[in-house]
Amino acid sequence: MLIVNLIVDFELPFVFSLKERRKIINSIKCRLKKFNVSILDISDEYPKNASIAIVFAAHNEKQAAEIQRKIENFLYKSFPEIEFYFDNEII
């Protein structure tokens, strides 16, 4: 059993307040719930950048890579106007 911690960093050049950023992050979090993952907003106070941690369990590395690929593809398709940077850690 593996635990995967996927950190997703966003660049939001069109956002000018923390309230706008929170609205976008909450939308992303709500849509990602269909993958049965735990999500935490780990952003700092700067509104143009955001980060979320996505944590999930997988049986093996192949399944972990598949779930991560599905999440990445979903984010790219659902939010094409946002730039994403991914970093993962497998425990």
Image (tube, grey):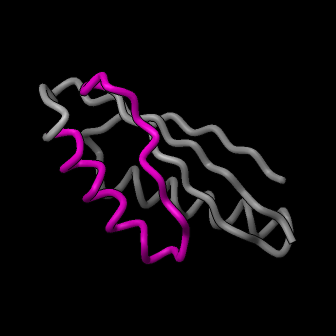
Question: What residue sits 39% from the left and 50% below the top?
Answer: 76
**Label tally:** 0
Left or right relative to 38: residue 4: right
Q: Position of residue 34 (x, y in %)?
A: 43, 77
> What stretch of residues is rendered in magenta?
20-48
Residue 33 versus residue 53 in the image, above or below: below
The one of 47 and 9 positioned closer to us in this rendering = 47
- Residue at the far front: name it: 45
Q: Position of residue 73 (x, y in %)?
A: 48, 57
Question: What residue sits 57% from the left and 39% below the top?
Answer: 86
Question: What residue sits 72% from the left and 70% below the top?
Answer: 57
Is residue 60 covered in magenta?
A: no
Residue 67 versus residue 20 in the image, above or below: below
Residue 49 versus residue 76 in the image, above or below: above
Q: Position of residue 48 (x, y in %)?
A: 26, 25
Left or right relative to 88: residue 86: left
Which quadrant would residue 27 be assigned to in this image?
A: bottom left
Which quadrant would residue 49 be assigned to in this image?
A: top left
Is residue 21 covered in magenta?
A: yes
Left or right relative to 23: residue 56: right
Left or right relative to 77: residue 13: left
Question: What residue sits 84% from the left and 53% below the top?
Answer: 91
Q: If the image is split into quadrants, where does the N terminus sit?
A: bottom right
Q: Position of residue 38 (x, y in %)?
A: 54, 65
